[in-house]
Image (cartoon, rainbow, N blue to C red):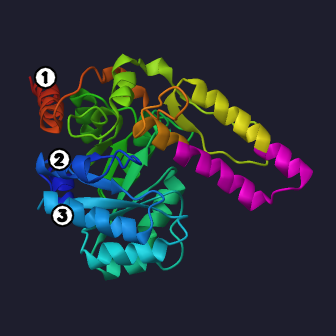
Amino acid sequence: MERGARFLGSDVAIMAGAMSWVSERNLVSAMSNAGGFGVIACGAMTPALLDAEIAATKAMTDRAFGVNLITMHPDLTALIQVCASHRVGHVVLAGGLPPKGALEAIKASGAKVICFAPTLALAKKLVRSGVDALVIEGMEAGGHIGPVSTSVLAQEMLPELAQVVPVFVAGGIGRGEAIAGYLDMGAAGVQLGTRFVCATESIAHPNFKRAFIRASARDAVASVQIDPRLPVIPVRALKNAGGELFTARQREVAQSLDEGTVAMAEAQLQIEHYWAGALRRAVIDGDVEHGSVMAGQSVGMVTKEEPIAAIIASLMDEAAQAFDKRAA
């Protein structure tokens, strides 16, 4: 973990996954102040909003933190410039291969680039293109997910990549014993999201936190695509009426396609906009029945609201005990 912590500029190599509406100034600064590595979720923010969020975060911590940018964001170039103007040290790119010039622009500012790599082939391509570190995230994670489990990705990718660049493992991690296992396999660190949603410092609505505390692993289910013309990246969230609403929304958009009242690109954009609005309804407004309660399968290990420092301390204690048992 020392390698990962040195790369991030943190005390421990535990990244807080970027969760839209949750990973803002309060959670990010608290995570970094507690010795971990906070990451601002830019999501659909405009450059002006991101500028304000970074400035506010810097006012709350003098520790290192990163910014997560979505590669398909129409203002990606401007968002990279905002990060550069604030001398953000780490930019995390999610949502597919970075467009031409994005990596170069980030690295020109002196920042390190971290990318998500869903397959070994893509990971190798990203390394060749100059990324500084990788996150491999399994299907157990919350939010947008791929089809392969964390344990399989780790077995396939760590032996090939861990000596080349720092690799952080994510998806379904809720206890320190799992962290110890992935470090033992060569990971430089880990990324957790679900575990930090119910941190005292998280601004998530009390209803949202209560939903997490009550839930079990099997309550966090992946969404279903109903029309092959509307490629929907599965989203893992707690079962509720919102999931049924999404299925109905897909049918509406598909019908608009049939009737020729909407173009394909616009139809796909409407699907993505649904998630952004549904997530805000749950996180900020507290509508956990009709909004999207995005959660990973580790949600069953979230049992109470507690400070981030306490969560990190318990994770590190569990990891240390696991290593002690192996050494005995």
**Which numbered marker is on residue 30?**
2
Question: Within 10 Å of the Cα at label 3, are there few (<14), some (14-19), or many (20+) other Cα atoms?
Answer: some
**Discs 3/1, front:** 3
SS at circle 1: helix
Name the kind of residue labelled 3 in the image: Lys
Quarter-of-image position of residue 301: top left
Quarter-of-image position of residue 60: bottom left
Residue 131 in view in this figure: no
Q: Position of residue 309 (x, y in %)?
A: 12, 38
Q: Are marks 1 and 2 in contact (CB under 8 Å)?
A: no
Earlier sequence position, callout 3 versus callout 1: 3
**In this view, 291 is above or below 303:** below
Question: Within 10 Å of the Cα at label 2, are there few (<14), some (14-19), or many (20+) other Cα atoms?
Answer: many
**Which numbered marker is on residue 224?**
none
Q: Nearer the viewer, residue 144 or 114?
A: 144
Q: Is residue 313 left or right of residue 206?
A: left
**Which residue is pictured at 48% across the width and 59% down the height?**
44
**Discs 1/2, front:** 2
**Which residue is pictured at 50% across the width and 68% down the height?**
98
Earlier sequence position, callout 3 versus callout 2: 2
Q: Which residues are magenta?
A: 253-277
**In this view, 89 is above or below 208:** below
Q: Position of residue 163 (x, y in %)?
A: 30, 56
**Which numbered marker is on residue 58?**
3
Give the number of callouts: 3
SS at circle 2: helix
Residue picked out by circle 1: 325
Q: Position of residue 164 (x, y in %)?
A: 32, 61
Q: CA distance from mark 3 to mark 1?
A: 40 Å
SS at circle 3: helix
Quadrant location of the C terminus? top left
